Image (cartoon, helix red, strand yellow):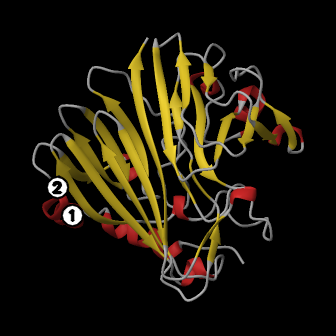
Amino acid sequence: MTCCPKADFLRIIFDTMPETLAALDQRFGISGKAVVTEGRGGLPAVRVTTRQCSGEIYLLGGHVTQWKPTDAEEVLWVSQHSNYVVGKAIRGGVPVIFPWFGAKADDPKAPAHGFVRSRAWELESVDADGDDVTVTMLTRSDDSSRAALPAEFELRLHASFGAQLRLELQLSNPGTQPLRFEEALHSYFTVGDVRQISIRGLDGTSYLDKTDANRRRAQSGNILISSETDRVYLDTTHDVEIVDPVMRRRIVIGKSNSRNSVVWNPWIDKARSLSDFGDDEWTKMVCVEPSNVGANTIEVAAGQQHTMAVTISVTSM
């Protein structure tokens, strides 16, 4: 069976009513730093503005769509053709992938990359610590999720906006049985020209090439993007760096409790086949995704927790 989050989307529609948004902002807003407001497509979002950065996160999917350090260019990439409608995931930013990565093995009709990126999350808290603002959102198991994942879970995303962007994805198992799942923070990054970047930190590791029947290959040197790229790097725990000579900056992706790094760019033909992706937008983005997938699937015992975290920072060249 597939997961049908219809009830969640009806709740999103209700939450976009001005009275409700005003009430949410009164409860969670922080004067001069964070506001709960109507985002694109009328969807509710939290917008952060501090001396160090601006940022944005939607209740749809607990989805971070913006992080821009002060006096710098936007770090995250979002398609100009992205849907901001009920029943659709946002294309770009940082989608939360759970509880499976890619297609569901036992149900090809199930939504790709799980169901939480296209359901309504609850806004749990907005907190300020100096110039950093942390937004916490929550989604949990319900009747619709149990149709696809017969288990109990609470999934929180703690998104801390500051001079760095730190994301913590925390899974709690309140059930009585172990819970197995895959996860990813599917980060899309803005680049000047993907054909000129290099990705450092994965030299000498092995990867599965999803463009070639998941053949296992060895990475030699830095990653250069010259064709459709869809790779799952194995047993990687260290930082990955995007070196961008066009934008004259380095994006560093640090992580903890993640054993995989996924690198993706659709290139020409795949981009044209995606309805929410502009034909030429592939030149301006690359995904580097901290994750635990495949052989690195996570199991959390009853009553226990697991947290995967990523820290994104930018330096000039």
Q: Residue furthest bottom?
A: 176
- Residue at (51%, 82%) from the top-left corner? 142
Q: Position of residue 283 (x, y in %)?
A: 62, 21
Please tell me how crowded label 2 is: few (under 14), some (14-19), or many (20+) other residues with Cα within 10 Å: many
- Residue at (42%, 42%) from the top-left corner? 65
The numbered disc on residue 24 is: 1
Kind of residue at disc 1:
Leu
Q: Is residue 314 visible?
A: yes
Along the line of sight, the residue nearer the viewer: 15 or 126: 126
Identify whether 264 is placed above or below 256.
Answer: above
Identify whether 307 is placed above or below 216.
Answer: below
What count of labels does the image hold? 2
- Residue at (68%, 62%) from the top-left corner? 297
Q: Position of residue 215 (x, y in %)?
A: 89, 41
- Residue at (68%, 21%) from the top-left corner? 222
From the viewer's perspective, is 142 left or right of 62?
A: right
Q: Position of residue 155 (x, y in %)?
A: 46, 68
The numbered disc on residue 29 is: 2
1 or 2: tag closer to the N-terminus: 1
Identify whether 75 is placed above or below 96.
Answer: above
In contact (CB < 8 Å): disc 1 and disc 2: yes
The C terminus lies in quadrant: top left
Identify whether 123 is placed above or below 4.
Answer: above
Q: Residue furthest left?
A: 31
Along the line of sight, the residue nearer the viewer: 180 or 229: 180
- Secondary element type, mark 2: loop
From the viewer's perspective, is 255 left or right of 210?
A: left
Residue 224 found in image quarter: top right
Tag nearer the camera, 1 or 2: 2
